[in-house]
Amino acid sequence: MHHNKKRPKVKPKKIDGLVGDLLAKWENQSKKQEIIMGAIWKKIVGDRIAKNTRVDQIRGKRLIVLTKSAAWMNELTFLKEKIKIEAKNIFSTYNIEVEDIIFKIGQ
């Protein structure tokens, strides 16, 4: 004998609603990561450099950092090896691998 139990009907969500929900979650996650990355970056380079630069993204094992000007990019190029060593150490504590840093103008 087959019993038909009445299940509460669940209205299917429209796909655009799901996509909107996913995008909102992704944006929040992305914003969280941006805040964390900014805090880590400040810890690596200090206030003065952090005010004139911004971590844009990590692509592969490369950290992309935006700078305010060519002068800043030039200064950071001289400090790159020192910053890279510090970045590798600090980011590794967050399970993020950084092998190289790319500086670009455009904050």
Image (cartoon, rainbow, N blue to C red):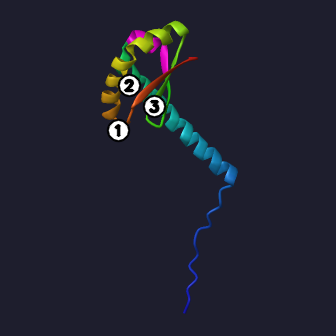
Q: Secondary structure at mark 1?
A: loop
- How far apart marks 3 and 1 lie (CA) works out to 14 Å
Mark 3 / mark 1, whichever is N-terminal: 3
* Residue drawn at point x = 44 percent, y = 25 percent: 101
For badge 2, the amino acid type reads Ile
**Residue on which the image places disc 3:** 62
* Residue drawn at point x = 34 percent, y = 38 percent: 95
For badge 3, the amino acid type reads Arg
Q: Main secondary structure of the magenta part?
A: helix
**Residue on which the image places disc 1:** 95
Residue 52 placed where, x, y %? 48, 12
For the residue carrying disc 3, how many other residues have a C-alpha within 10 Å: few (<14), some (14-19), or many (20+)? some
Q: Secondary structure at mark 3?
A: strand
Residue lying farthest top? 71
For badge 1, the amino acid type reads Asn
Mark 3 / mark 2, whichever is N-terminal: 2
- How far apart marks 3 and 2 lie (CA) works out to 15 Å
Q: Give the left or right position of residue 105, taking residue 33 as reference.
A: right
Q: Give the left or right position of residue 39, taking residue 74 as reference.
A: left
- Quarter that holds the C terminus: top right
Q: Secondary structure at mark 2?
A: helix
Residue 4 placed where, x, y %? 58, 82
Write the start and end of the magenta stretch as one range: 47-54
The circle on residue 40 is 2
Q: Is residue 28 magenta?
A: no
In this view, the residue in front, 60 or 12, is 60
